[in-house]
Amino acid sequence: MTPKTTILTLPKEELVHPGSRACTGCGLSIAYRIGLKALGPDTILVVPPSCLTVLQGLFPVATTKLPCLNVTFASTAAAATGVMEALKAQGREHIKVVAWAGDGGTSDIGIQALSGAAERGDDFLFMCYDNEGYMNTGVQRSGTTPQGAITTNTPFKGKLQQKKDVPAIMAAHGIDYVATASAAYPLDLYDKIKKALTLKGTKYIHIHTPCPPGWGFEPRYSVKVGRSAIETGYYDLYEVEQGVFRLTGASEKLVEKQQLVPVREYLQSQARFKLLSEEQIAQIQSQIDTKWAGYYQAG
Amino acid sequence: MHMIENGNVAAAIGVKLAGAQVIAAYPITPQTPLTEKLSEFIEAGEMKAQHIPVESEHSALAACIAASSTGARAFTATSANGLLYMHEQVHWAAGARLPIVMCVVNRAVGAPWNIWNDHQDSISQRDTGWIQMYCCDHQQIIDSVLKAFAIAEAVSIPVMVCYDGYLLSHTYMPFEVPEEQQVARFLKPFRPAYALDPENPANLNTVTLPDTRVDINGDMAHGYMEIRYLLQEDLRATLAVAQQTEDSFKQIFGRGGDALLEPYRCDDAEYIVVGLGSLTYQLHDVVETLRSEGHKIGVMGIRLYRPFPAEALVQAVRQARGVFVIEKAVSYGYEGALFSDVKAALFESAQSGDPVPFVKGMVAGIGGREIRTADLTDTLRAAVTGSPRDAGDDPGWIGLRL
C-alpha cells in the first residue's frame, strides 16, 4: 500500500492560479486546487457549465494551467470519450483525460452520457463535485439535494425527495473504481485520484462539496461543515474497488470509535435545513444509525 | 474503380478514403447503413479509426467536437430527429470553429413519426453556422465527402453533406471510387491551428463577454460578437473557398466544375426551376418533356445551400422570365426557406431597377409523398402557360390530396 499523502509530501506546484472567481469559502476551490495537484500537468480537462466554469475565469483569462475543453451541459462524459479516442488515434495516450462536473452535470442532465461512457468502459476519470444543488444558477434543487433542504425552487417545504445515490449508480455499471470524497478532506481526495489514475477504464469520484451561499453558513466554516457531515455519519467516505466496498479515511475511523456525533449538529449548522422538525431530525438520525449499524457489523 | 452500390456505402467509402480518425454515431433510419459500413471497415482492419458507439446523437456530436478539438479528423452521420437531438451541439461545433463533417441523410421530422425523405431536418439547421452541401447522385455523395473535409479544414467550419434518404441512401447506382493516391494529393492531413495539448494549455470555449477584453499581455481579445462576426465573414468567404476546392478536385479527378450551382439547360431558359438534391435530377426529365412541347425551361440545382450563393444565383437566373422554387421543407408559418432565399437574392437587383424574374414557390414530397414526374410536368406546364405570375397562392403544394 502506498503511504498516505500528507501536507508535507503534497506537490508544491500549483495548477490553479490564485484569485479565481469562486465565492469566498468555496468548497470546490479546495477540491479543485488539491485535485489538480493529484492529476498533474499531463492532463486534459473537460468541463460542462457549472460553478467551475465561473471559477475558471472569463475569456481571455483562465485560472487553470491545464488545457481545458468547455462543453455543453449534457455532454461531458461523451466529450471526455472524444478527447480520449482522439489522443489514441494520435498516439498520445499517455495524456490523462479528466471530466470535472457539478452534481447537475453529473447526476441529472449529464447522466445519460456518463452512463453510456461507463457502460463502454471509456478510459477517463470523471470527477463530480457535489454541492447538492444548482448553485451556479442560484441554488435550485438537483437530484443530489438532500431531503428537507430549502432551495430557491423548493422555498417553503424544502426538497421532499431523497438524495440520488450517484456513486451507487456508477458502481452498478461494474466499473473498476468508484469513490466518495469530501472537500473537507483534501488529502484523502488526493490519494483517491492518484489511485484512480493507475487504473484503466472509467473511474468515478464523487466529492461532497460544502457551498456557503447555497447551504447557508459563513464562508469560514466550509471545512468545519464538510467535516461535520462525515463525523455525524451523514455522508460517508468510501471506495468501491472492483465491486468491493470499503470505508476509508475519517469514515473508516468512525467504525473503530463506534461513536457518531449527533446529526443535529450538522443539520443545524446550515440555514437550508431550518425547516426540519424535531421529528424529521430524529428520522434522519435513525436512518444514519441503521446505516452505521450495518457498517459496524461488517467491521 | 467503378462500383455499383447504394448511397450510404458511397458515403462510407468517402469517409474511409478521407481518413477520418474518430467516428461517433448513433443509429437512425435511413442513415444507419452508413455507419454500419464504417464499423465493418474498422473491425475488418481496412480502416484505421476510433469508432465510438455512443448512446445518443447528442453524444455523437459531443465526441466529434471533443475529438476535433484534440486535433483528430472527426466524422458523424444522422437523420431527422437525430439531427434535431444534436441541435445544441450543431451550434456548438460551428461556434467552436471545428472542421467536423457530418452526413445528413435527409428524412422527415416527427411528429407524427415518418421515416421517409424530405428536407425539413437539414433545412431547419440552416442558421447554425454550418456549411451545407446537397447531393443529387452517388458520385456526388462520395466526392462531396472528400470536398467537405477539404473545405471544412480550410475555413475551420463544419460541413453537412446532405443527401436524400432512400432515394439516394438505399438505391444502387454506378459511381467512380477515387483512387487513394489521388485522394492523398487532394486532401492533406489535418493540421489544426490549435489542438488540446498539456504542453501548450488553452481553455477553449470559455465564458466570453459581450465586450472585448484585454488579455494578460495587454492585447485586446475578441468579445462574443467579434467571434460570431468572424464566423459570418468566413462563411461568406467559403463561397470562394468551395469553388477553389472544386477546381482542385476537378484537376485531380476530372469531375465536377461548379461548387455552388448545377444548371441544366438554363442558357436560353425563359423559366428556371430551382431546387435541392435528387429532385433536381428528376426535373431534368420534366425539362426534356416540356422542351419537346416548345416550353423553354431549365433547372438550377443548388449544390451549396449555406453559405447561400446569392450572387451566382442572381447571375444565373436574372435573364429568365420566371423562377419556380420547388422544395421539400417549409418554414412553418411563412413559406419554403429556399423560396425566401431566392426572392431575397433577387431583391437587390429589383430595387436597383433591373428587370428580375417573378418567383413562385412550391412544396413537394413532404414526409416522402411520392413526387411523380407526371405531376411535376403537369404543374410546371400549367405554370408556364396562361399567366404564371398570378397562378395560385405561394407556396403551392404539389401532390396534396385533401
Image (cartoon, grey):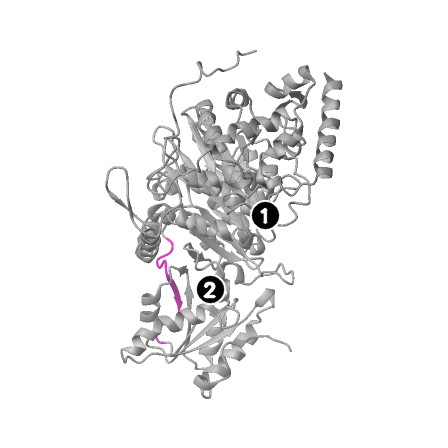
Crowding at dot 2, Cα within 10 Å, few <14 / some 14-19 / many 20+, comes out as: many
Magenta stretch encompasses residue B257: yes
Magenta stretch, main secondary structure class = loop
On the picture, is A186 further left or further right than A228?
left
The residue at which mark 2 appears reads as B276
Give the magenta range. Answer: B255-268
Residue that extends furthest to the front in the rendered view of this protein: A278
Q: Write down the quadrant of residue A266 in the picture.
A: top right
Q: Position of residue B383 (x, y in %)?
A: 48, 82
The residue at which mark 1 appears reads as B33
Res. B112 in view: yes
What type is the residue that disc 2 sits on? Leu
Closer to the camera, B284 or B97?
A: B97
On the picture, is B334 further left or further right than B29?
left
Earlier residue among tags 2 and 1: 1
Tell me whether the residue at label 2 lies in contact with that at label 1, contact meaning CB atoms closer than 8 angstroms.
no
Q: Position of residue A93 (x, y in %)?
A: 46, 26
For the N terminus of chain A, give its image quadrant: top right
Residue that extends furthest to the left in the rendered view of this protein: B218
For the C terminus of chain A, give its image quadrant: top right
Total tally of numbered discs in the picture = 2
Magenta stretch encompasses residue A38: no
Q: Say yes or no: labels 2 and 1 on the same chain.
A: yes
**Secondary structure under badge 2?**
loop
Please state the chain letter of the residue tagged with numbered disc 1 in the rendered image: B
Q: Position of residue B98 (x, y in %)?
A: 40, 45
Residue that extends furthest to the bottom in the rendered view of this protein: B386
Res. B317 in view: no
Residue at 42% x, 42% y is: B179
